[in-house]
Image (spheres, rainbow, N blue to C red):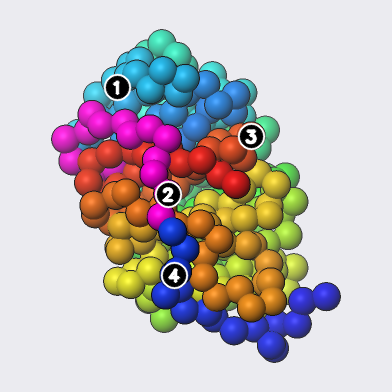
């Protein structure tokens, strides 16, 4: 049993030895803000401030296709559950691409304001986006608007979808983590999570926990049934920018302004003060993270314009 009252946020003055990447993928001409991996692990997609979407063949590390339909920075990527489509989110538009051909399947005109995160539902029946003050939900493949969930926050910087697709977890500019019911567009739970904006959220495969990363430098684990804080770390000097949870839910990874990627136990372990692993080959802020479906590899995207692949324990 985890006792939230005894939780300590440990400082990551890491003694862990940094590890070298398995591969470095370099093609983008500006910061990489989003990465995604296909459900079969065959393809990796990357995108960012250069407005381009790149599709990589993981086995060879070679660029397979590039998609250039956006006119502004691309902030989000997600593969459909079957891996046959890729969604990329620009400032106000979601482009849907066929995989692996890279042909454009559909353009969804989103909210008339900035959007920062995009996710398919687990069964592929809707696409959700987070942006200025709200979350948009569109049916798929038609692309018709289902509804808009409006909140009294300046920005929804990131979203994650629960495993059954019934709820969406949002990380907000006011530091809160909010759980939304997709069916009725109402807030289920609002957590005063951080002192600064939440830039990344992830949900465990069983839907029991969410992990948030904030510009206050901390990463925190929340029990979604009651919003209780069960674990957390002071992880990245200057701010934490990205989190991802391993497929089995044993670990989560974080990335931040210090250019480091760190691996942590999801739930507390006695005397755990430093990351289990430290990956420190990026030269600028780590903006995005994603685990491969088999849990053996982690991908990170950075302002240094590269994507790096890391071997997991």
- What separation in Å lies between label 1 and label 2 (alpha carbons)? 32 Å
Which residue is at a point 51% across and 70% down the rendered structure image?
274
Can residue 51 be found in the magenta stretch?
no
Discs 1/3, front:
3
Can residue 25 be found in the magenta stretch?
yes
The span picked out in magenta is 18-35
- What separation in Å lies between label 4 and label 3 (alpha carbons)? 27 Å
- 236 shown above or below 63: below
**What is the x, y in percent for residue 34?**
37, 42
Question: Dot 1 surroundings within 10 Å: few (below 14), some, or many (20 or more)?
Answer: some
Residue with the mark numbered 1: 67
The reply to whether the C-beta atoms of the residues labelled 4 and 2 are less than 8 Å apart is no
Residue with the mark numbered 3: 294
- The quadrant of the picture occupied by the N terminus is bottom right
Residue with the mark numbered 4: 14
- What separation in Å lies between label 4 and label 1 (alpha carbons)? 39 Å
SS for dot 2 = strand
**What is the x, y in percent for residue 113?**
29, 51
């Amino acid at each position: 049993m985890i006792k939230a009252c005894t939780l300590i946020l440990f400082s990551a003055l890491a003694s862990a030895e940094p590890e070298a990447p398995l591969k470095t993928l370099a093609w983008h001409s500006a910061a990489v803000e989003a990465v995604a991996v296909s459900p079969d692990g065959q393809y990796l997609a990357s995108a960012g401030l250069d407005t381009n979407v790149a599709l990589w063949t993981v086995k060879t590390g070679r660029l397979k296709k590039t998609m250039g339909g956006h006119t502004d920075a691309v902030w989000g990527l997600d593969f459909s559950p079957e891996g046959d489509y890729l969604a990329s989110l620009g400032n106000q538009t979601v482009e849907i691409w066929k995989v692996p051909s890279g042909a454009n399947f559909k353009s969804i005109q989103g909210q008339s304001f900035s959007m920062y995160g995009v996710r398919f539902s687990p069964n592929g029946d809707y696409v959700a986006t987070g942006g200025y003050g709200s979350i948009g939900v569109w049916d798929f493949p038609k692309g018709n608007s289902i509804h808009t969930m409006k909140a009294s926050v300046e920005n929804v910087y990131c979203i994650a979808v629960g495993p059954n697709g019934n709820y969406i977890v949002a990380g907000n500019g006011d530091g809160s983590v909010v759980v939304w019911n997709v069916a009725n567009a109402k807030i289920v739970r609002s957590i005063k999570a951080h002192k600064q904006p939440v830039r990344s959220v992830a949900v465990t495969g069983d839907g029991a926990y969410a992990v948030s990363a904030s510009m206050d430098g901390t990463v925190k684990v929340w029990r979604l049934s009651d919003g209780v804080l069960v674990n957390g770390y002071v992880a990245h000097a200057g701010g934490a920018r990205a989190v991802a949870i391993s497929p089995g839910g044993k670990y989560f990874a974080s990335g931040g302004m210090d250019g480091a990627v760190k691996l942590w136990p999801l739930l507390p372990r006695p005397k755990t003060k430093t990351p289990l692993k430290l990956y420190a080959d990026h030269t600028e802020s780590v903006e995005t993270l994603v685990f491969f479906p088999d849990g053996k590899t982690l991908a990170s995207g950075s302002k240094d314009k590269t994507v790096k692949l890391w071997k997991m324990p």
